[in-house]
Image (cartoon, rainbow, N blue to C red):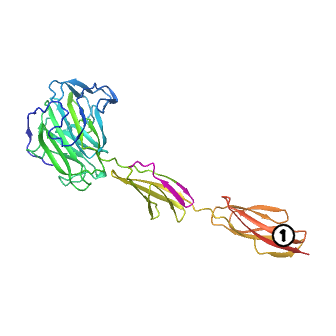
Amino acid sequence: MAASCDRAEAPVEPPRFSSSAWANEPAGFTLLSDYGFDDAMSVGDGVPLSDGWYLYNPDGFATQTADPGAPVSPPNVGQWRYPVGFGGGAAPATMYRDLGVPRGEMYFRYSWKASNPWEGHPTGVNEISFVIAQGNILVVEMNGTPGGPYHLIVNAEFTTSNGHLDNSTGDDPGARYLFGNVNGGNYVVTPGQWYEIEVYFNMSTTSTSRDGTIRWWVNGTPVGDYTTVNFDAAHPFEEFDFSPTWGGIGGTKAEEDFFWYDDVRLSVRSGGVPPAPVANFTSSCAGLTCSVDASSSTAQASATYSWSWGDATSGTGKTTSHTYGAGGTYSVTLSVTDAGGTSTKTQSMTVTPPNTAPTVSAGPDQTDLTGLLYTESATFSDPDNGPWTYSIEWGDGSSLTGAASSQGTISAAHRYLLFGSYTIRVIVTDSLGAQGSDTKVVTFIL
């Protein structure tokens, strides 16, 4: 990180409150919010304010107060109070606004002042505002240990998990303290004075293209200009916060301090970044065939749907089906892709082959003597779904039933008292109700 000579400049009064664009606001941007802190700031969680803002203020440390010297929209300003004993790593309150749709390019400006004296934290962290990008943040910060000097910096807290990376130093992903790198280096801010802070960012084309931009100005003067930042549009920004966190974990305030905010302006490139799709699907299976339906996914109408069936084959379509070659449990992955990126969903599907009925052989036709005890020896085979039950119909109006725990031979004896021909029928039923049968003719003579 650069560490050029420090400089301090007296605040220059910016234009008074206006809905017109500021000098450093990119042409063609659309106003999202121009908020002058004209609402009472009540105690509570999710307190609605005007112009789409909300307030998390459980302890009442954020209040509306008057400052006739506020540079943009006097007299009303927002006041954040840090009482004696306030713990490090926390903010007195949070005022936040959703950006409507995820944004890849944005401009914001606001007026800010720290109380004088100001008790800094040993970690040097005195955070002022946040832009939140799916768990990763862009922070404007008054950086400096107790006693100062305090520098106005931008902290790019990007992580490996989403590919965000500041390449200005060539380091690995992680938090980046981006100090002033133009017009003389680090910008020193003096507690007790109002400052007009402006920030512009534009996401990189991809997570590795190194063409993202972060620029900021203080009182209209360029301070930071970084054009080698990776933060791709797959992870756009979603929310702006005033959540002024004092320090890292540990430590408590020994004095009462304050932050004040005057008018805040948010503007964006029209359209924003399309939201990322969310993949989801339902499935149903019969035998070896499964049908899938991705209609419960959240995606644009132009989205494509691709499937990996878990058996080294693939398919496409929002609704489709697939037949497996063998029973088992398969991990099926749906990928949904649209202009907002790609989302995947994996879940297991279990298929079973259709039930095979038993194969039965009653044996060849026979001739025997009347009155002798006749023994029927049948055989059956079945690859699945035992145990089995069987019945033998003797052809003379009588029958018997039995059970078998394994494939093989079924034997039973029966005595015929009258000569003649009889059709014997052997029926085997598996545990799922599938049946197989066979018949034979036995002729009895005198």
What type is the residue that disc 1 sits on?
Tyr
Residue 429: percent from left, percent from top = 70, 61
The image quarter in which residue 148 lies:
top left
Q: Name the spot of residue 99 as percent of width and height, x first.
A: 29, 40
288 in magenta: yes
Question: Is residue 446 shown in magenta?
Answer: no
Viewer-side residue, 109 vs 164:
109
Residue 144 or residue 44, whichever sits in front: 44
Along the viewing direction, whichever of 106 and 300 lies nearer the viewer? 300
Tag 1 residue: 422
Q: Where is residue 31 in the image (x, y as percent from the top left)?
A: 24, 37
252 with respect to 320 (left or right): left
The kind of secondary structure element at disc 1 is strand
Q: Looking at the image, which residue is at 68% across and 58% down? A: 433
Start and end of the magenta stretch?
Answer: 284-299
Decide if residue 285 is on the left or right side of residue 89. Answer: right
Q: Residue 161: horizontal and vertical position, in percent?
A: 31, 51
Quarter of the picture containing the C terminus is: bottom right
